Amino acid sequence: MRERTIYFIFTDTGTYLSRLINFFTHKPLNHVSIGFDHELKEVYSFGRVNPKNPFSGGFVREDIRGDFLKDSNSAVYTLNITEQEYILIRHHIKEIEKRASDYKYNFIGLLGILFKIDIRRKNAFFCSQFVATVLQDTESFKISKPSNFVTPADIRERSELQLIFQGRLGDYPKHQLAEEVLDLPKKSFFYLLSKKVKQFVVR
């Protein structure tokens, strides 16, 4: 059966809300997003709809190279899933995206985690609750607790995930390009010289 790869992007934006969550959880990187391509051009989460307004929360398609996220501390993980699971997850997200204006950020739900109170709200998610919800029908990734109690750390600590990058988010995937260049066999001086001569002759 064909396998697909999805991506989990964990970030710390340094905002007041992020610092507050870090203080209570004693864990770093308390924002999580889910992506569907290696270059992370298609990334979704629940967060700030307007980066300049901390209270404008809801469903977002994130730009990892935008001003709000590019300087964030981050870690990127991959997870291999089946083709059917991939289709289910994408369908679930697209259904939310179609009605994005009906959804809101679940600020109250964060208090539920802090005080261990089971708070369930219709059409409201915080980031890790959203990710856990869209993954709930997959066999490749299971978390035993209800989605409204799932934290980014719960997702990040799963053994199924593979870390592929850690650092400033705006630098992704530059490190991989650099490694690929470094891994190439070094060409001899005569090879490089002959290549230059050929280019000159062709011109």
Image (spheres, rainbow, N blue to C red):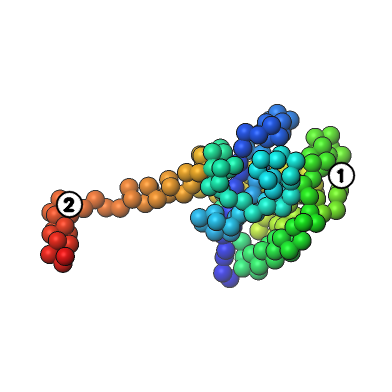
Image quadrant assignment for residue 69: top right
Number of marks in picture: 2
Along the line of sight, the residue nearer the viewer: 201 or 42: 201
Quarter holding the N terminus?
bottom right
The residue identified by callout 1 is: 119
Give the image location of residue 93, x and y in percent: 70, 60
The residue at the point 70 percent across, 28 percent down is: 23
Q: Secondary structure at mark 1?
A: loop
Task: Name the kind of residue labelled 1 in the image.
Answer: Ile
The residue at the point 43 percent across, 45 percent down is: 175
Q: Secondary structure at mark 2?
A: loop
Residue 107 position (above or below residue 88): above
Along the line of sight, the residue nearer the viewer: 74 or 66: 66
Position of residue 47 in the picture relative to residue 39 (left or right)? right
Mark 1 or mark 2, which is nearer the start of the sequence? 1
Label 2 to label 1, Cα distance in Å? 65 Å
Quarter holding the C terminus?
bottom left
Give the image location of residue 184, x and y in percent: 30, 53
Position of residue 201 in the picture relative to residue 54 (left or right)? left
Residue 80 visible in image: no
